[in-house]
Amino acid sequence: MTATQQAGGASPVDFAAFGDYGDFRRKRPERAAGEFVRAAYPFRGRVSADGSSGYPAVPRRYHLYVSWACPWAHRTAIVRKLLGLEDVISLSAVDPVRDGRGWAFREGPGHSLDPVNGFALLREAYEATEPGFDGHISVPVLWDRETSRIVSNNFPDITIDLDTQFGAYANGAYDLYPERLRPEIDAINAVVYENVNNGVYRSGMATTQAAYHDAVTKVFATLDELEQRLAGRRYLLGDAVTEADVRLWVTLARFDVVYHYHFKVNLRRLTDYPNLWGYARDLYSLPAFRETTNFDHIKRHYFTTHPHINPTRIVPDGPLLDWDAPHHRS
């Protein structure tokens, strides 16, 4: 048993011994003028209903490794629950606090040991798939029990495959990526990803005033547009929840709790937008959103694992938000 392990999982978080996450990774691409550059997601297998991709959509073959803190992983958990795939694709969550070893499996509130492979660290899944892997260790990970390797860590593909390839096992309650709306969903997703989902990171991780200003300006210009869009419709595409709503919501859920202060996206709060705040509460009222949202994990992850932003690692008590207030959107 190594220093990184203990019986049944990883040894406790230890920043003094292992440093902060990123210390043991290959360097990211050069930043342009202080801009944040997101690391690549190299595992891009696809699951297909007919098995033509090499990964057939069958029950109990796949496992999702997630962090409740991570917005990209949170998407997959929401979609899995909306579609009623809990008995088809298993799921487990890592410890939200990570030191230099990356995401780790430990017993704790809302997270657990690895029930599939007994890994102590998620990097072991990457190593099993590509020996010598020294890139970014990210969640979500879609793991294939049959081949004992990662199918995908590319979060946009994972939810689309859940939406479109597991129809034989889904509950039929939602069609999150209907064919007739796909061009519009894709267009909204592209803007929301660039300016909101990733935009808050570009703001918070910027290392020059100009890069920060550019990012934060685009975040709020897009939120202003979405506020107007939601004035006349319940969800982004009308009266039904789609993939676009899932992708936007995971950032809205973290906005006032973390991003407004921690990432300096502080021109306005989510609660200052009547339509967006009502829309966010409307989605939160659905079990798939509410039951996959862990504000404790979200806050502890961000405030303890970005020491260049929050060197004290103190987790704030607030803000106090009433997610259960009537949303008047129905």
Image: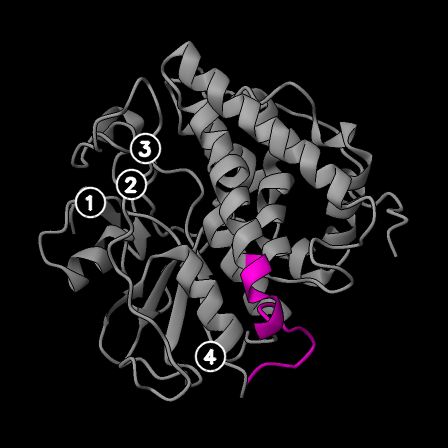
Label 2 sits on a secondary structure element that is loop
Q: Are marks 2 and 3 in contact (CB under 8 Å)?
A: yes
Q: Would residue 162 be found to the left or right of residue 40 on screen? A: right
Mark positioned earlier in the residue sequence (2 or 1): 2
Residue stretch rendered in magenta on the structure: 169-185
Q: Is residue 87 magenta?
A: no
Mark number, residue 37: 3
- Gap between marks 1 and 3 measured at Cα: 14 Å
Mark positioned earlier in the residue sequence (3 or 4): 3
Label 1 sits on a secondary structure element that is loop
- Residue at 55 percent across and 68 percent down: it is 80
Q: Are marks 2 and 1 in contact (CB under 8 Å)?
A: yes
Q: Would residue 66 be found to the left or right of residue 220 on screen? A: left
Mark number, residue 135: 1
Type of amino acid under label 4: Gln
Q: Would residue 60 be found to the left or right of residue 283 on screen? A: left
Q: Is residue 240 above or below residue 214?
A: below
- Residue at 57 percent across and 73 percent down: it is 179
The residue where tag 2 is placed is 39
- Gap between marks 4 and 2 measured at Cα: 27 Å
Q: Residues within 10 Å of mark 3 (few under 14, many from 20)?
A: some
Q: Position of residue 77 (x, y in %)?
A: 53, 61
* Front-lying residue, 116 or 85: 85
In the image, farthest residue toward the left: 132
The residue where tag 4 is placed is 165
Q: Is residue 177 magenta?
A: yes
- Residue at 26 percent across and 60 percent down: it is 43
Q: Position of residue 268 (x, y in %)?
A: 69, 22
Q: How is the image coloured?
A: one colour
Mark positioned earlier in the residue sequence (4 or 1): 1
